[in-house]
Amino acid sequence: QVQLVESGGGLVQAGGSLRLSCAASGRTFSSKAMGWFRQAPGKEREFVSAISWSGGSTYYLDSVKGRFTISRDNAKNTVYLQMNSLKFEDTAVYSCARGRSVWANKDPAQYDYWGQGTQVTVSS
């Protein structure tokens, strides 16, 4: 059984930074892509960022490009999302997910395990 546990969320002023972490259990972490998704109140879940199994390929939602950086440490079974220059519209519950394959993907159907999420609130 795979478990994903996010941490690092919180309340921050616009323009500030947060670093989210997602710790994964299980031995298959290093052979799977990982992704971050977010869901704001009253809105659909949306893709934020994804990283391939090796970290060699990354993808971002257009609105976070240049502000967010995804990375992973396979030795620690952890994926990170560094969020800089945060905006009010980044407020959401952020969840990490494990991909079904090695390749990063924007489609949530390509992810098989999900964390509970961590709240990020950006005050304007």
Image (cartoon, grey):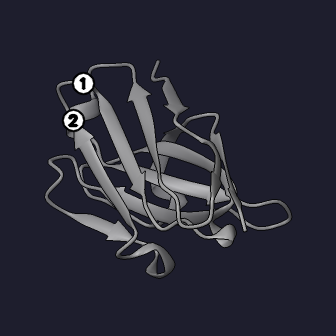
Identify the residue at image location x=41%, y=27%: 23
Q: Are marks 1 and 2 in contact (CB under 8 Å)?
A: yes
Residue 61 lies, with reference to residue 33, above or below; the image says: below
Q: Residues within 10 Å of mark 1 (few under 14, many from 20)?
A: few
Packing grade of label 2 (10 A; few <14, some 14-19, many >=20) is some
- Classify 99 as above or below 91: above
Q: Position of residue 32 (x, y in %)?
A: 28, 42
Residue 76 lies left or right of residue 120; in this view the side is: left
As helix, strand or loop, the secondary structure at mark 1 comes to: loop
Location of residue 76 by image quarter? top left
Q: Could you say which is closer to the camera, residue 40 or residue 109?
A: 40
Q: Inspect the image, locate mark 2, and give the three-letter code of the amino acid beneath it.
A: Asp
Locate residue 113, reporting x and y percent: 51, 37
Q: Residue at x 44, y 67 (%)?
A: 106
- Label number found at residue 76: 1
User: On the image, numbered disc 2 is attached to which residue?
Assistant: 73
Q: Amino acid at mark 1?
A: Lys
Nearer to me, 74 or 119: 119
The image position of residue 38, as x and y in percent, is: 61, 57
How far apart, in angstroms, are the residues tagged by discs 1 and 2? 5 Å
Residue placed at 38% from the left, 76% from the top?
65
Decide if residue 122 is on the left or right side of residue 37: right
